[in-house]
């Protein structure tokens, strides 16, 4: 009985912390896209698959429409187009930033020698941060600590494995 009560209290505290963290986003708040985000129509997936041809460029100004649970809804300031980011809203800082100066410059093509920040700005959040470990529930800090980033082409195929040494790309493997 005591174990069950402790477990319930623990779950409650974790959910409270997550809700407070997610609550830092407010409706009508203006933010900026942290990295290039790939879209299919108006849907953005947390794993940012490269087969999605529409791209919202890093630095794009957006306004929050709704944020909570498993999605973040925003409109771009440029053309007022509405997008739904299907991602853990408690981890919003993997996709959006409040200060445009936090965005690192990315490059169109990634290459050996680039920093993690440059790869992140160019490619977005990796789908996996180690073999079989999804980035979905991991904060940006955990992602930046990982030395292997896996990106997906689509729901069935990997696109790239990027390996880092001392925060710098050491190899890029294509699948």
Image (tube, grey):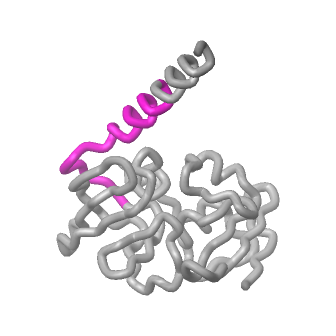
| Residue 161 percent across, percent down from the top left | 72, 73
Residue 27 inside the magenta-drawn segment: yes
Residue at x 46% of width, y 71% of height: 36
Location of residue 18 in the rendering, given as x and y in whole percent from the top left corner: 44, 36
What residue sits 37% from the left and 63% below the top?
85
* Looking at the image, residue 154 lies above or below residue 91: below
* Residue in the foreground of this view, choosing between 28 and 70: 70
Q: Quadrant of the C terminus?
A: bottom right
Number of numbered discs present? 0
The residue sitting at the top extreme is: 2
The part of the image, by quadrant, that contains residue 58 is bottom left
Residue range corresponding to the magenta coloring: 13-32
Which picture quadrant has residue 56?
Answer: bottom left
Q: Is residue 67 above or below residue 154?
A: above
Q: Position of residue 29 (x, y in %)?
A: 23, 48
x, y (%) of residue 132? Answer: 71, 62
Question: Is 22 included in the stretch rendered in magenta?
Answer: yes
User: Where is the N terminus found, in terms of image quarters?
Assistant: top right
Residue that sits furthest to the front in the current view: 1
In the displayed structure, 47 sits above or below 9; it is: below
In percent of the image, x 31 and y 54: which residue is there? Answer: 31
């Amino acid at each position: 009985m005591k174990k069950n009560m402790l477990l319930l209290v623990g779950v409650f505290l974790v959910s409270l912390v997550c809700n407070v963290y997610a609550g830092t986003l407010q409706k009508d708040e203006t933010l900026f896209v942290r990295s290039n985000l790939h879209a299919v129509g108006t849907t953005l997936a947390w794993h940012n698959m490269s087969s999605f041809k529409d791209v919202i460029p890093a630095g794009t100004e957006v306004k929050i429409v709704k944020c909570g649970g498993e999605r973040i809804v925003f409109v771009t300031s440029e053309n007022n187009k509405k997008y739904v980011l299907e991602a853990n809203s408690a981890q919003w800082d993997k996709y959006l930033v409040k200060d445009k100066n936090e965005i690192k410059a990315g490059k169109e093509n990634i290459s050996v020698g680039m920093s993690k920040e440059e790869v992140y700005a160019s490619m977005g959040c990796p789908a996996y941060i180690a073999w079989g470990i999804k980035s979905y529930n991991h904060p940006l800090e955990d992602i930046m600590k990982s030395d292997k980033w896996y990106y997906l082409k689509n729901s069935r195929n990997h696109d790239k494995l990027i390996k880092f040494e001392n925060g710098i790309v050491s190899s890029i493997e294509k699948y």
